[in-house]
Image (cartoon, helix red, strand yellow):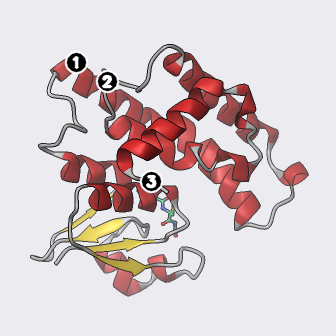
Amino acid sequence: MLTVYGDIRSGNCLKVKWLLDRLGRDYRWVETDVMSGVTRSADFLARNPAGQVPAVVFGDGRVLAQSNAIIGYFGEGTDFIPADAYDRARMYEWLFWEQYSHEPYIAVVRFQRLLGGKEADEIEPRLMERGHAALARMEAALNGADWLVGGGPTLADLALVAYTRMAHEGDFDLSAYPAVRAWIARVETAFGIR
Ligand SMILES: N[C@@H](CCC(=O)N[C@@H](CS)C(=O)NCC(=O)O)C(=O)O
């Protein structure tokens, strides 16, 4: 049986849950509170030396971490990974961009506001600026396109929707990004996200 260690409040963890649910895979979810310090315990570090969720443990004991590596693994052989090499590379382009230029701003501000107890005026302005720059880049890409890559939903949409649909929890007002808002609804439908 596949085991997923995840915190249900985390977009990185939800990416994995949404894909497994969408693909009808059997798994055991072990709720892992990232605020409790458990991800830095000796037991957990033995499983994932990075001390983070999500992490999955396969029936044979092998472990895989990093949300986008995990969805890449389970996405193999599905339409969520484009067959065309260029489109597939474009999908990876978005996945790497998500982790370096989107999540560190949009997810981090949300985390600081929601779980870190910070007020809006305590948030570093640079984080808000970079978050808005990420949303503006997505708005430009989705203006006239239904999906980030090609003609259907891919792992790029799944990865990017995770924190984009929660951006308002970090005070990012999505009303300035109409194409992004319409895309969120499309991706939610495609992956059965509620
Ligand atoms: N790049 C990693 C980021 C994972 C990550 O930041 N996990 C957070 C929750 S969203 C975590 O486990 N934090 C607890 C800690 O760092 O101790 C991924 O995509 O999986």
State which tag comes first along the sequence, 1 or 3: 1
Could you tell me the amino acid type at mark 2? Arg
Between circles 2 and 3, the one closer to the viewer is 3
Q: Quadrant of residue 103?
A: top right
Q: Residue at x 60, y 50 (%)?
A: 107
| In this rendering, the label closer to the viewer, 1 or 3 | 3
Residue 136 lies, with reference to residue 102, above or below; the image says above
Q: x, y (%) of residue 61?
A: 15, 77
Q: Is residue 34 visible?
A: yes
Crowding at dot 2, Cα within 10 Å, few <14 / some 14-19 / many 20+, comes out as: some
**Residue 159 makes an appearance in the image:** no
Quadrant, the N terminus: bottom left
Residue at the image point whose x is 20% and y is 37% from the top: 79
Q: CA distance from mark 2 to mark 3?
A: 23 Å
Question: Which residue in the protein does label 1 denote?
Answer: 86
Q: Name the foreground residue: 176 vs 94.
A: 176
Res 90 label: 2
Q: Which mark is residue 193?
A: 3
Q: Where does the image place residue 64, in percent across and percent down from the top left? A: 25, 62
Along the line of sight, the residue nearer the viewer: 40 or 53:
53
